[in-house]
Amino acid sequence: MRSVTRFIGLDVHADTIAVAVAERGGEVRSLGTIPNRPEAVRRLMKKLGDAKQLRACYEAGPCGYVLYWQLTELGVACDVIAPTLVPVKAGDRVKTDRRDAEKLARCHRAGDLTAVWVPDAAHEALRDLVRARLAAKQDQLRARNRLGKLLLRHGLRPPEKARRWGRAHMAWVHAIRFEHAPLNAAFADYLSEVEHARDRLQRLEGAIDEAVAVAPPKMRAVIEALQSLRGVAKITAATIATEVGELSRFATAPQFMSYSGAVSSEYSSGPNTHRGAITKTGNVHLRRVIVEAAWAYRHLPRIGSTLRARQQGQTGKVLDIAWKAQHRLHTKYVRLTMKGKHKNIVVTAVARELLGFVWAIGKEVEEHFAATTAAA
C-alpha cells in the first residue's frame, strides 16, 4: 500500500465516467468526465502515471465488470465496491457525479469501502446463462398464468385428474376452440407463448448441462458434490456455484449465511436487544434457491433413487455431511412447526442452517481438490 500514490474514484455510467483522484495525504480533486470507452480509460490511466502506483474503485452496477477487467489488464489495482455499504452523511442532500467520484476516491484512500468478489469472464458467462434460465422460468410462469386466466374467464377448467401443464392437460388445451374469431386469435397467441416458453426453457437447461460439463474442474466438483444434499439438484447447485464462487473464501459458515441475507436483522442499544426479519441484503439469487431447497426437509430423512444417483462417486465425508443435514434440518422443521411458527418462517430458518451444510461441503471439496492438485 505504501507504493500507492493515487486513489482513483470512478462514477461509472453507460456512456460516461466521472473521475476523481485522491493524492496520498493530499487533496481530493475532480478530473472531469471521460467517455465510457476502452481507449478513453487507457489514455486516462497513462496520464495518471505508473500503473503500479494507482488504485481505482467504482461501484457495482449495471455496467458489470468490463471496466474492472480492463484496468486489471493495464496493471491497475481495482476494487468493485458494494454500493449499499458506501458511507453516507446524514445531512448531505446534494448528489452529483463529480461529488460521487470524489467521495469514492476519499473513502477508498481511508479504507472505508467494502469490495465485492469479482468473477472472471468465463465464470460470469456461466452465471449469465443460469440467470437467463431463471428469466425463462419466470416468463413461463407468466405465460401460463395468462392462458389459465383466459380459460377460467370463459368457464373452462382442466380435467380433475390431469397434472397441471402435463401431457394430458396440454392435450385438453389444444382441443379447445371458441365460437368468436377474435377470442380464438387471443387464445392461439397465449398458447404459442406457453409453448415458446417451454421450448426456451428446455434449450437453456440443455445449455447449462453442456456448460457444467466443460466448466473448470474445481467448480464442476463443487456442483456435483452439492447435489448430494436433499433438495439441491443440478440447477440449484449451479446457481450456488456461479453466484458465490469459491465457498472457501468465507472463513466461517455464519459469514456465508450473512452473505445470503438470510440472517436476522438486529437493532440493539444498551441492555435492549431486538431482532427482526431477515436482512435480505445479500445475494437474492442464492437466497431464492436455498429457500426452495429447504422445503425438501419437511419430509422424513431418506435417500431415494434420484438422490442416490446424484451421490454416486462422492467421498464419505461429503455423504456424511449430507446425511447429517437431513436429520438436523428435518428435526428443526418439526420442532419449530410444533411451536406454532408459520411455515414460511420455519423454512427460512431451515434454509439459513442449510447454508451451513452447503458451505461445509463446498469447503471440503475445494480443499480436497487443492490438496490433490498440489500432490500431483
Image (tube, grey):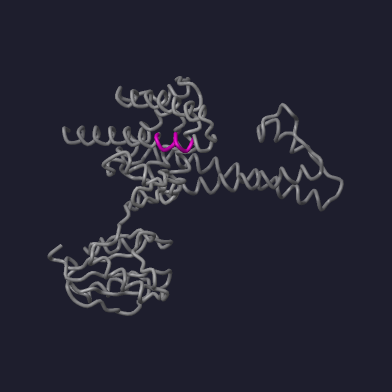
Q: Is residue 102 above or below residue 188?
A: below
Q: Quadrant of residue 241?
A: top left
Give the residue displayed 40% in from the left and 39% down from the top.
212
Q: Residue furthest left?
A: 2
Q: Nearer the viewer, residue 147 or 267?
A: 267
Q: How far across and how far down the image is residue 266, in percent?
A: 40, 48
Q: How far across and how far down the image is residue 338, in percent?
A: 52, 27
Q: Nearer the viewer, residue 355 or 56?
A: 355
**In-image side of 216 versus 290 (left or right):** left
Tell me where the magenta segment starts and ends, as one range: 347-353
For the N terminus, the quadrant is bottom left
Q: Which secondary structure type mostly characterizes the magenta part of the structure?
A: helix
Q: Is residue 277 above or below residue 51?
A: above
Q: Quadrant of residue 217?
A: top left
Q: Nearer the viewer, residue 32 or 15?
A: 32
Does any portion of residue 53 appear in the rendered image? yes
